[in-house]
Every structure is written in C-alpha cells, then in structure tokens.
Amino acid sequence: MTSFQRNVPISLTENALRPDRGGKLGKPTKVLANFFAVKKLGADTIHHYDVSISPELPPKKIRKLWALIEQFPELPKDAVVFDGRCNAYASEELEFSGSLVRKVQLPDSHPAPAAASDAQSTKNKNEFTVKIKKANTIQLEELHMFLARKGPLTSSCLTACQALNIAVMHKPASELITIGRNVYTDANPTDLGKCLEKRDGIHQSVLAGQENLFLNVNTVATSFVKGGSFVSLIAEHQERPIEGLKSIQPRDVAALNSVFRGCFFTVTHRGGEFKRQFRISEVSTKSADQIKFDQELNNGTKRSVTITQYYASAYGIRLRFPSLPCLGVKGRDNRTLYFPVEVCHIVAGRHFNGRLNEMQTTKMIKSTSVRPDERAKRINGAVATLKYSQNPYMRSFGMEVSSDMTTVPARVLQPPSVVYRNNVKAKVANGGWNWDTSHKMVTGAKIDSWGVVVFDSPSPRFKIRPNLVEGFVRDLVDTLSQNGLNVVLKDPPVVWGQNGNVEASMRNGRDRVMAKCKVEPQFLLVLLPNKCATYSHVKTYCETEGRNIITQCIAASKLSGPRVTASSIKQYCRMVGLKINMKLGGINNIVPPAELPFITDRPTIVFGADVTHPAPGENKPSVVAVVASMDNRCARYFGRLHVQGSRVEVIENLNNIVEDLLREFKRINKVVPQRIMFYRDGVSEGQYEEIRRTEVEAIRQGCRQVDADSKVQPLINFCVVKKRHHARFFPQTPGQADKSGNCIAGTVVDTVITHPTEFNF
C-alpha cells in the first residue's frame, strides 16, 4: 500500500522555506486584496470518489450526464461535487459498499429523425455505464496544521483544496461556460473583429494563506467565436460584402479552419423543428460545385452528383454561393458529410484559444483595461452575484466565505536611484521618470557603419514618402548625438526594399553599407509600414544561419498621422536610441553599486530565462531565451536562443547554455561568479517540482563544466516569476494611490495571503 493510500503525511516540496514573517524594509501601509477569507470550514473529513464513465464523453455532455447521476438515491442532495472529469467529493460518506455501478440513458437533446430500425442503435449510443468507487478519506486536520505552519504540505492538503475548489465551482459550472477555474457569461460581449468576440467572466480559486484559507476572486475575459449565419461570418472574416463572396483563396480557407474547426452549427434547410447540432471537422478546400458523392435513387441505382445538384433535387434549393467551401462533419462510419455554408448557422459559445491578431489584441486590451477602483467594484459585484452563503454545495462542506476583501499589511520600498553619465540622477517618481536634456547615456556606442532599409506599402493608407525617411533619419541622428552616442556616419545609405523579397532587400542593404564603409554594418534600421508579416521575415533572415545582422525595426505609423507631432517623434527617437545603444554594447543608465550590495559584494551573475510556445494548433517548436548579466552593474547582458520540442516547458540543454554564458562572464571579468541569481518565467505551480529537479541540477552541471576542479560551487538562488496570477491589490485611501489609482510602485505584500511555508511574495 502506498503512503498516499494510507494517508501518511509526506512532504511534497523542497522549495526554499519562508525564513520569517515578512520583510521589514520600506514604509508600512495596508492595502485591500481580492482574497475573501474562508471564515469557517465545518467538515472534518472529505470523501473522495473515482468516477468512470464508458464510453467516453466530451466535457459538455459529461456535465449533462452528471445532472442525471446526481439524482441517484445513494447521492445525498447537494452534497456531492464533480470536477467534470473523473473525481467526485462528498461531505459525507455515500451509502453503498464497494462501488456503485449504474447504466444511465442520456436523452438526445437534438435528435435526428431516425427510422424504426435505428431506434435501438440510438438508444445504445446514448446509454452509458457509470461506476463510482471510494478512493480516499481526507482528514482536514492535516490542512489546518499546514495552514498554521505546524505540519507539512501533504497529499491530503492538496486534495482537500482541490475538493473545496470544486465545491465552489460546481454550481456556476453547471450554468455557465467553464474554462479551468473561470466561468464566463454571454451577456454584453465585445466585438473583436474577424468573427471573434470578448466575453467577461469570473475567476475563483481556493488558496492557502498564512493560518487561513482564502477565496481568490478576479474578473477575467477571453475570446469566443461568434454565432450566426456562416455566410455572414465568412464575409466578416474576409472583410468583404456578402455579394462579393464568389470564391475564397486556399490560405483563407486555412484561416477559417483555425477559427471554426470544432464549432457546432445547426442547419436551416430541414425546417424550424430540426435543431440537431453538428460539430465542424473541417472547412473544405473544395466548393459545393466540386464535391461529389454517390446519391442512391429510388430504383436502387446510384448517380454521382455535386452538393449543389443534390440540394437542388432533394430540397429545391438553388445555392447562391456554389463556389464557396462546405462544412465537413464526421459521420458514424467516419465518412465526412458536407453541408453548403449558406444552410449553416454557427452556434455561439466556443472558446477560441488561438492567437489574436494585432487589431484583435488592441481591442481586447482596450476593453479589459479598467481603473483599479472599477475593477474592485466589479469583483465585489461578482461576489455579491455568486451568493456564496446560498450555494448549497459550499454549505454542505461547511464553507462560510467573507463578503469583504481582506485588508493585508504591505510595505512601500524606496525606489532605486537611476544614474546617467557624470553621475546625473533621474528624478524617479511613481515608478518612472522623464528624460531630461541633461541625461546622457553612461556609455554611448560609436556608430560608423549602418544603413536604412525601407519596405513600402502598396496601400495609400500606409505609403512611406522619401521625405519622411530623410526627416526621421535626420531626427534620429540628432537625438542619438544629444543623448551621448558617437554618431560618425550621419548620412547612411537608404535602400528601398521589396516586400515580396525580404532576403534580397536586406542583402542589398548590407552590401550598400559595406560599399560605403568598407566594413560589415553595425546595424540596419528597417522602416515598415506597420507591424506586418515582413517584420518576422526580416528578423528570421537577419538573425538565423549565422548572419547575425543587428536590426532595429520602425513602424512608419509612429512617424506620421494626426496624433504625431515633432515632440512625439523626438520622444520616439529617444526610445529607439535606448534600444540601439544596448544592441551595440552601450550602457544606458545604472543603479549605483551601493544600492546593489547583493550584486556587488561578490562576483554575481543574474540570469533570466523563458520558453515561448506556439499558439494552440500550430505545429512549431518552442523557443528558449536565456540572458545573463556580464558586469557588476547588471547593465550589460549576453543572450542565447535554443529551439526545442513543441510545448516542452523544461529547458533542454540548459547546462550547456549556462556553461556558455558563465565562460563569457569569466572571459570579461577574469573570475567565475560565486553567486547565481536565476529568474525563471512561465512556470505553472504544477511544474515547480519538475523544474526544480531538472533545471537547478542543469545549472549545477553547467557550473561543473566550467570549473570542474573547484571545490566550491556558486550559490544558486532560483526564483520563479509568475505573471498570470489573479492577485490584485487596491489602495484603501486615495492618498495611498498613484495618479492612475493603483498601489504606489514598490508596494510589497509578503504576509497573510502568501503561501504558509514557501518563500513567495
């Protein structure tokens, strides 16, 4: 019997433990957090059951089936919650011994007309065998001991929190669209364009704090596919009037598949009573005029007909759009059945988990950006709407949740000094500072070989005029010189590129610089009409296959338009100059060494690492990026890229990447670092242990590869940086807020709602 089965406490973490009850530096204050205290947890035990359903069902139908299972007499009313997959939890032990096995008939909510001979097969198809078996009994005493820091984090603690999360989610999950721990409503969607819409939702999660459980509640939003006539949706996606939909290109069919594959639709040619939903397996590459199948005639013979011909003879429908693709549906015999798009009506409500384009992203950000006081109002409104005190499933577990946000102690740290050349300090306020004419970069790069490549647009809207290029180059040169760079070449060669041939254009730009300067270009300035596909082509060509051509891309939309002024162009040139200087090895500004004792008191290297994954549905590799500081001011960084298996989060080959960057540090500083600070982005809680076990060991291995004879290896501080959490903090009074209503920059929370034992803040 395993320790889990015996419920013997075992420690599940070897992460750094919290050394104290919170830090002391900074000005004390208090803030509101979107954590609602679980005031009471009445149950002493939770009973865990395994649920198996055969044959397997999609999640949407499992919820419908569970609604029937809840009516079993062995399941007390409102006392059993289900995770939608295979786990059920009860506040009291169910009244059966061994296991409960039942056959359940799931009614077909949208049945297709069937012949009498099909009735039995339809019945069998909708009949499911449900088996419920006791898995474990969880004693909540272990959870209470863990919260009080008197016991370890055990499997029982994790299972108990999981059960309570499901108790919170069970009721809304049966009524709303559920994605993870988020539930979404279809009220007041926001149009994102290209057949997508934004829907608002609520995130709910039971989390362990210090000496208490909390319910973390936040407002969320995500994208969904719109519903409606599929012809109208095609017209919207193609940005064309319906009358202009004569045909569409293969690349557009692929784009439609990326949006609509997996959606459900109904058909309009079978009458209003026929409401069966079909799932889209494909948007066909062939049109209704091109797809043929064998139609069985009344005399028993067959004839080959197109979809267009079939609908004319069978339904008397003359298709208006016979040259458009069809929607494919997998039949019971795995054959694909096709429906012409004009008889199809897309059912709204499918989550779109692909990548939004630039326009959609802008609309999403604009729609979700609200002031902190408005966000707090919405969160409190969500808690009031959810009525936790009236949730029968939460009541069955004895859960009482506060209706008020938690007030937590916080500290506001003193902002660091930002120093430019000649020890000129910037005036830092509210986490930022303005560029002053006295600010010059600490170390300005020398620029004596560079060029400009312009990719114009055929659209008059994005046309780039020659005088615009000349004026911007002149402004950029003046600004760079004023800010401390040594611009020797003030009249770089300008090449007008071809969007259809990026490689030749960039090669031409490089050759023109070499012809004028007799050396390789330090960088190429690339003007683009907007953030378009050409950008990725430029970066791919210049930064792969050993070419190592540094580029700085510029969007022409920043240089002209109704909101562009001479002052805004000047400011834009300053921002671009910061990037150029860093890319050429310069140093923009520093923090005084006295304010970085944890960096300067001994040789220290700071790493940053992340893994970028392809969008869902894309068959592309994941890309690893690792950077590391090369000086004791953390002002110069070297970087390394690595390609690995698609959606693999653990960094492969990390030992060799670390070795390479450590050798660069040693070459520059003539010493190996004694301390490593490694900041790791993009890791979920479920991956902490795997990352700690594999990547920390890989870092140690990289150190040994650099200096195998050393008896003392560097100290390693491995810090996971998590961006996609749902903790939100709000000032209690206007005097505690910045001008946008947020908590003052430098506010730190490291008690009450943080982990009971692990070192997080």
Image (cartoon, rainbow, N blue to C red):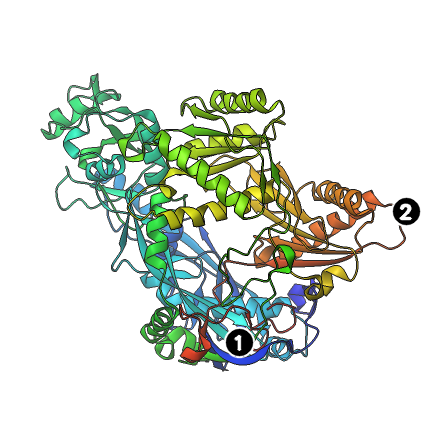
277 or 153, nearer to the observer: 153
Circle 1: residue type: Leu
Q: Residue at x 47, y 23 (%)?
A: 505
Asked where in the image residue 535 lies, by quadrant, the reply is: top left
Say which quadrant the N terminus sits in. Answer: bottom right
Relative placement, left or right, of 272 versus 642 is left
Count of number-bearing discs: 2
- Mark toward the start of the polypeptide (2 vs 1): 1
Rendered view: 531 above or below 144: above
Say which quadrant the C terminus sits in. Answer: bottom right
SS at circle 1: strand
Relative placement, left or right, of 142 versus 69 is right
Q: Residue at x 50, y 75 (%)?
A: 214
Rendered view: 542 above or below 668: above
Circle 2: residue type: Asp
Asked if residue 532 shows in the view, the reply is: no
Q: Residue at x 29, y 30 (%)?
A: 459
Relative placement, left or right, of 222 versus 19 is left
Q: Comparing marks 2 and 1, which lies closer to the viewer?
A: 2
Tell me the tag on residue 280: none
| Residue under numbered circle 2 | 709
Q: Residue 319: x, y in percent? A: 14, 28
3D distance between C-alphas at marks 2 and 1: 49 Å
| Residue under numbered circle 1 | 213
SS at circle 2: loop
Q: Residue 748: x, y in percent? A: 56, 71
Residue furthest toward the left?
316
Q: Residue at x 37, y 41 (%)?
A: 559
Asked where in the image residue 209 lies, by quadrant, the reply is: bottom right
Q: Residue 69: x, y in percent? A: 38, 62
514 or 344, nearer to the observer: 514
Q: Mark 1: few, some, or many residues within 10 Å (few <14, many ≥20)?
A: many
